[in-house]
Image (tube, rainbow, N blue to C red):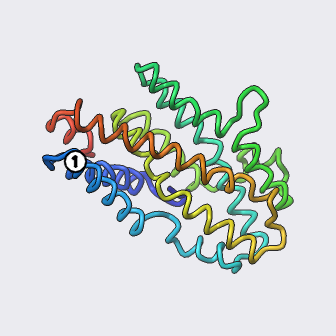
Amino acid sequence: RGTGLTTRSNNNRFSTCIDWLIEAFNQKEVNSIKVIGGQGITDLGKQRYHSLHPFHKLLHTGKLSFKQVQAWALNRFYYQWSIPRKDLTLMARINDVKLRLEWRSRVIDHEGDIDGSGGISRYLQLCETLKLDIDYVKSCKGLLPATKFAVDAYVNFVESKSLLEGIASSLTEIYAPAIHQERITGLSKHYEWADDYALAYFKKRIGQARKDVEFGREWVINLSLIHISEPTRQAEISY
């Protein structure tokens, strides 16, 4: 998941995740389904996750200027800010109260509860450390059009596609702990400003992402097994 992706590439990535689950569905044993589906999604991340982009390699090896890192943090904020929008959009479509309650924790992780001390506020610590004007960051006035287009495409995907596809799109979190760890290690090594305060968001997300993805993966596989007919499933992933 990255802010430079087009709608087509976002849709293709999410569809491919579900394609692997459909392939797994055709196996006779439930254990085979879980192994093949999980391995397929893992392999997909090794080929297409945004951590492979040359920009992230430059970022993590200390080869970007201070202004380039500022621009990255400024644009990435829109993605951070939009994750709760995406999750609330999904929750509005969920009729199962237990599922909504489970999904609500994701919104709280990012926005915080009444005190507001969630992932967005921790991400703004990075922006503060990078000497960005916080009001300007939150206004999103400095956003590149391509960034807004790509992030909005993710929210629109969750709103317009099936519930199965919307929840499956969250499975990109399978790859998140690794890139967060790579980012923490690289930034700490190469940039003087990269202290615990600046990197608090990424450090916290390692554990949160692992928790979220385990639930999402089980739900998607179980729904594919029990509730989705082959014609319906095929229709839902055809664009």
Task: Residue at 51%, 30% (x, y): give it.
Answer: 102
- Judge from the rendering whether residue 17 lies leftward or rightward of residue 213; answer left or right: left
Q: Nearer the viewer, residue 23 or 52?
A: 23
Task: Residue at 35%, 65% (x, y): give it.
Answer: 43
Q: Amino acid at mark 1?
A: Ile
| Residue 31 on image: x %, y % | 24, 49
- Judge from the rendering whether residue 37 lies leftward or rightward of residue 202; answer left or right: left
Q: Quadrant of residue 238?
A: top left
Residue occupied by mark 1: 22
30 w.r.t. 4: above or below: above
75 w.r.t. 57: above or below: above
| Label 1 environment density (alpha carbons within 10 Å; few <14, some 14–19, many ≥20) | many
Q: Nearer the viewer, residue 78 or 213?
A: 213
168 w.r.t. 114: above or below: below
Task: Residue at 76%, 37% (x, y): give it.
Answer: 117
Kindly state the secondary structure of the residue where label 1 is placed.
helix
| Residue 160 on image: x %, y % | 39, 34
- Judge from the rendering whether residue 33 lies leftward or rightward of residue 6; answer left or right: left
Task: Residue at 65%, 73% (x, y): give it.
Answer: 60
Q: Nearer the viewer, residue 171 or 2?
A: 171
| Residue 87 on image: x %, y % | 53, 35
| Residue 134 on image: x %, y % | 82, 48
